[in-house]
Image: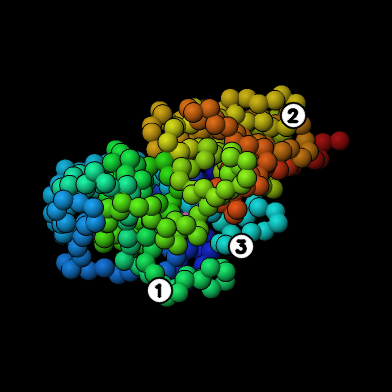
């Protein structure tokens, strides 16, 4: 997009800071840290790296405590990965759903460096009875009283991962984002990176890891971040984990005016959960059906892919643009909202309406009689 303006983040909430990436300004595969979305349930803790320690206990052979220097001295792993807040796109739900009204930008792709969670767990020695790995953040507070399920007192932000995912190559404890130390809002000094999973699993400001033998049923695991599933007949609640397949047009934006006969680059990013996106298709509403978008990067597990489609509008008037992604597991973006997703995981196709206008007349043309 040929703009001279500097993109600026969209503040969805001042305190604690909840900030959206201005998705229409998307240009690079990696989102610069100062534009990266921020999702905080509580005030970001300001942790002193000299005092900070990571405690690992629970169902382990040897409880351990590690300081930052010893974690950084371990073998490092880098994973470019996309993180999407489960509430991204909530604004598109009709009627409106309670919660922060994220548009398209509660998502971002960054390069994360740290150590495999597996290696830390192996240092402590996971007992055979282990079932989940609970990650606890240093932030805490009373859960929003507007929600009917307010907490009885301050509770820490904590989430568990099934042991299998905790041991996977996609589960990292990261101290660096885009080659710089994490910033305070992104979890300094250490956060979880859980490739393929929605953001709530990516616990920031981690100070404590407990290996548990029973499913953890804390607030953000058992009272929030759910959707309904009807596969067993009666609807039952299932926890949100993997991200859904998604592509959403960054440009043109809703209401844009394009000039007839002039090529325009439809541009966006696309991502999914455990399996990468294979195909993006575009429909420009001129009766030519779905056509193939061009994916710009090679497929890479857990990162997003930018894509484009060159479109030359042939007719003046309103046009509805749509795109849809398909991932390697065969999941396709749906046409309609998921009625069972509470206020989460919005991945249905969001049409973008643009106006195609005639070529502007030049001075000479106007005066030729
Ligand atoms: N400790 C802690 N970790 C957290 C959160 C939080 O409030 N506290 N928010 C989670 C949610 S809901 C999301 S979407 C991601 C967002 O990560 P970011 O702020 O670095 O973009 O962090 C997750 N990790
Ligand atoms: Mo989130």
The numbered mark at residue 286 is 2
Q: Secondary structure at mark 1?
A: loop
Q: Residue at x 44, y 32 (%)?
A: 275
| Quadrant into which the C terminus falls | top right
| Quadrant into which the N terminus falls | top right
Can residue 202 be seen? Answer: no
Q: Is tag 3's residue or tag 1's residue first in the polypeptide sequence?
A: 3
Q: Position of residue 337 (x, y in %)?
A: 66, 44
Q: Quadrant of residue 154?
A: bottom left
Q: Is tag 2's residue or tag 3's residue first in the polypeptide sequence?
A: 3
For the residue pair 261 and 44, the one nearer the viewer reads as: 44
Q: Position of residue 285 (x, y in %)?
A: 73, 32
For the residues labelled 2 and 3, the Cα–Cα distance comes to 36 Å
Q: Residue at x 53, y 68 (%)?
A: 149
For the residues labelled 1 and 2, the Cα–Cα distance comes to 55 Å
Q: Residue at x 31, y 51 (%)?
A: 213
Q: Residues within 10 Å of mark 1 (few under 14, many from 20)?
A: few
Can residue 307 be seen? Answer: yes
Q: Residues within 10 Å of mark 3 (few under 14, many from 20)?
A: few
Residue 141, relative to residue 193: is it above or below?
A: below
Circle 1 residue: 154
The numbered mark at residue 66 is none
Q: Residue at x 14, y 53 (%)?
A: 62
Q: Nearer the viewer, mark 2 or mark 3?
A: 3
The numbered mark at residue 98 is 3
Residue 120, relative to residue 56: is it above or below?
A: above
Q: Quadrant of residue 158?
A: bottom left
């Amino acid at each position: 997009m040929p703009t001279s303006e500097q993109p600026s983040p969209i503040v969805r909430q001042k305190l604690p800071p909840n900030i959206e990436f201005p998705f229409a300004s998307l240009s690079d595969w990696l989102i610069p840290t100062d534009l990266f979305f921020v999702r905080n349930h509580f005030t970001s803790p300001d942790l002193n790296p000299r005092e900070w320690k990571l405690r690992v206990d629970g169902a382990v052979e040897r409880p351990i405590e590690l300081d930052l220097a010893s974690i950084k001295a371990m073998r490092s792993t880098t994973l470019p990965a996309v993180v999407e807040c489960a509430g991204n796109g909530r604004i598109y739900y009709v009627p409106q759903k309670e919660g922060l009204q994220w548009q398209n930008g509660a998502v971002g792709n960054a390069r994360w460096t740290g150590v495999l969670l597996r290696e830390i767990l192996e240092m402590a020695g996971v007992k055979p009875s282990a079932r989940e790995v609970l990650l606890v953040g240093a932030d805490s507070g009373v859960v929003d009283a507007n929600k009917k399920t307010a907490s009885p007192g301050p509770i820490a932000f904590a989430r568990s991962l099934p042991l299998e995912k905790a041991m996977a190559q996609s589960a990292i404890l990261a101290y660096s984002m885009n080659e710089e130390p994490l910033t305070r809002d992104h979890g300094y000094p250490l956060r979880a990176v859980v490739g393929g999973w929605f953001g709530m699993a990516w616990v920031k400001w981690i100070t404590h890891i407990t290996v548990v033998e029973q499913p953890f049923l804390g607030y953000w695991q058992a009272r929030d971040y759910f959707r309904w599933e009807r596969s067993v007949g009666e609807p039952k609640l299932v926890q949100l984990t993997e991200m859904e397949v998604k592509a959403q047009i960054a440009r043109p934006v809703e209401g844009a005016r394009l000039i007839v006969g002039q090529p325009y680059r439809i541009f966006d990013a696309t991502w999914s959960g455990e399996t990468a996106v294979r195909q993006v298709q575009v429909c420009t509403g001129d009766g030519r059906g779905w056509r193939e978008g061009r994916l710009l990067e090679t497929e890479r597990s857990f990162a997003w892919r930018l894509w484009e489609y060159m479109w030359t509008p042939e007719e003046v008037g309103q046009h509805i643009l749509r795109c849809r992604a398909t991932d390697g597991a065969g999941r396709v973006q749906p046409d309609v909202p998921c009625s069972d997703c509470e206020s989460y995981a919005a991945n249905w196709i969001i049409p973008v309406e643009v106006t195609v206008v005639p070529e502007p007349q030049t001075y000479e043309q106007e005066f030729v009689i």
